[in-house]
């Protein structure tokens, strides 16, 4: 197997978080793409452009960035501080009509974003301060470690009826 660069996106700072991928549920069986042409076809077969394959990651510049499968900027969200943790994409395990992204930053903020637009839907501040670990979600509970030697469990509650089934 030979690896070759398909695209590159320049950020305003180093990237320490691992990208999280969103693959629409009806496209999950198509994971075997190999080329830029395959990624383009994957996005074109999606039922809506906004629910196409994309990747989300945090940056040292305090930005959360969402890129299309072609490496084009879809949206950018400014956090209070650097983002070292990997975003967690909530697809349908939380009974959402649309995918969401949960991301944490080093100031202790936890943001819930709409994956389609990057719009902030909710924010919480952990008393323990700095968050470097990546959040995980089970049912409607978010679990994340903090620099104060504690692991926190937060309950996710969406007050927006149009986001729920």
Image (cartoon, rainbow, N blue to C red):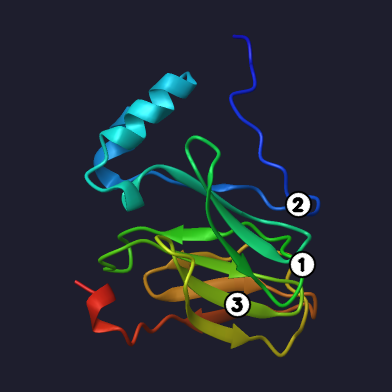
Residue drawn at the location 73% of the way across and 66% of the way down: 62
Residue 133 location, x and y as percent?
A: 69, 64
Q: What crowding class fits label 1: few (fewer than 14 Cα within 10 Å), some (14-19), or many (20 or more)?
A: many
Chain-order first, disc 2 or disc 3 = 2
| Residue sitting farthest toward the left | 165
Which one is nearer the viewer's eye here, 47 or 21? 47
Say which element carries label 3.
strand
Q: CA distance from mark 1 to mark 2?
A: 9 Å
Q: Is residue 32 visible?
A: no
Q: CA distance from mark 2 to mark 3?
A: 17 Å
Q: Are marks 1 and 2 in contact (CB under 8 Å)?
A: yes
What number is the disc on residue 91? Answer: none
Chain-order first, disc 3 or disc 1 = 1
Q: Is residue 157 visible?
A: yes
Work out which quarter of the rendered image holds the C terminus and state it: bottom left
Q: Which residue is mark 1?
A: 82
Q: Is residue 162 above or below residue 136?
A: below
Q: Is residue 1 above or below residue 114?
A: above
- Closer to viewer: mark 3 or mark 1: 1
Q: Which residue is mark 3?
A: 110
Q: Which residue is mark 2?
A: 16
Q: Are marks 2 and 3 in contact (CB under 8 Å)?
A: no
Q: Is residue 64 above or below residue 154?
A: above
Q: Is residue 97 left or right of residue 118?
A: left
């Amino acid at each position: 197997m030979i690896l070759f660069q398909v695209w590159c996106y320049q950020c305003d700072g180093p990237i320490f978080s691992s990208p999280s991928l969103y693959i629409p549920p009806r496209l999950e069986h198509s994971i075997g793409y190999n080329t830029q042409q395959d990624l383009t076809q994957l996005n074109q077969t999606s039922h809506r452009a906004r629910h196409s394959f994309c990747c989300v990651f945090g940056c040292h510049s305090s930005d959360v960035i969402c890129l299309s499968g072609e490496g084009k900027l879809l949206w950018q969200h400014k956090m209070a501080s650097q983002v070292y943790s990997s975003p967690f994409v909530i697809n349908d395990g939380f009974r959402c009509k649309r995918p969401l992204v949960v991301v944490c930053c080093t100031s202790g903020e936890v943001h819930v974003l709409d994956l389609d637009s990057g719009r902030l839907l909710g924010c919480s501040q952990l008393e323990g301060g700095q968050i470097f670990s990546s959040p995980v979600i089970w049912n409607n509970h978010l679990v994340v470690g903090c620099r104060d030697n504690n692991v926190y469990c937060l309950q996710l509650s969406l007050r927006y009826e149009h986001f729920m089934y």
